[in-house]
Image: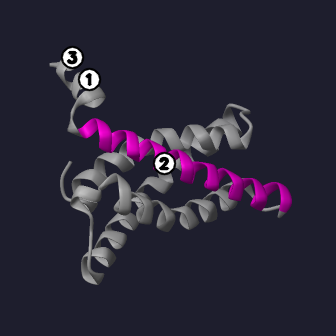
């Protein structure tokens, strides 16, 4: 059973979707990291506040890219569907913010990890959560 699940992730219909999700996530994570660096190092903001603002900014960017490319086969089209999907992804990603911030905080304050590296770990950890709920709820199916 585990073998078939792993095989489906590598070559099944979910594989293409998952790869696209990772590409979009990596791209928007890069934007988020740049924003975080700008807020903290250039702007002097607290790293948790900077991370929260950076996450919020990239939520809309991520939705637009995922809707257009990752989930193109089940894309939200028309104003009502598009806005409903945007609200749903904001709920999913909004509930993932505490996960990412908790990982960030724990690694920085208790593990003495540099804040950008800790944020990257938080992105990966919360990314699994976001994919599952976005695929199932925002776009309705995998």
- Residue name at image x 48 percent, y 48 percent: 25
Q: Of callouts 3 and 2, which one flags the residue occurring earlier in the amino acid sequence?
A: 3
Q: Name the residue under label 2.
A: 25
Q: How far apart are marks 3 and 2 (CA)?
A: 26 Å
> Please, what secondary structure does the residue beneath circle 3 have?
helix
Is residue 101 visible to the viewer in this orientation of the structure?
no
Front in this rendered view, residue 53 or 84: 84
Percent x, y of residue 59: 49, 63
Q: Are marks 3 and 2 in contact (CB under 8 Å)?
A: no
Chief secondary structure of the magenta span? helix
Residue 104 placed where, x, y %?
A: 61, 44
Vertical side of 59 occupied by 102: above or below? above
Marks 1 and 2, how far apart in space? 21 Å
What secondary structure is found at the residue carrying circle 1?
helix
Circles 1 and 3, Cβ within 8 Å, touching? The answer is: yes
Q: Residue farthest to the bottom?
A: 79
Please give the residue where the numbered disc 3 appears in the rendered image: 3
Task: Name the quadrant containing residue 4.
Answer: top left
């Amino acid at each position: 059973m585990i073998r078939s699940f792993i095989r489906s992730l590598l070559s099944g219909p979910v594989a293409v979707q998952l790869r696209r999700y990772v590409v979009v996530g990596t791209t928007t994570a890069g934007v988020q990291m740049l924003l975080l660096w700008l807020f903290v190092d250039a702007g002097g903001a607290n790293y948790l506040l900077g991370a929260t603002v950076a996450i919020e900014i990239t939520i809309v960017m991520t939705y637009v890219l995922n809707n257009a490319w990752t989930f193109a086969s089940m894309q939200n089209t028309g104003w009502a569907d598009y806005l409903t999907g945007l609200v749903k992804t904001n709920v999913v990603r909004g509930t993932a913010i505490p996960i990412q911030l908790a990982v960030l905080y724990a690694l920085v304050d208790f593990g003495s990890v540099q804040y950008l590296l800790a944020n990257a770990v938080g992105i990966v950890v919360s990314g699994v959560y976001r994919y599952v709920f976005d695929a199932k709820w925002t776009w309705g199916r995998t």
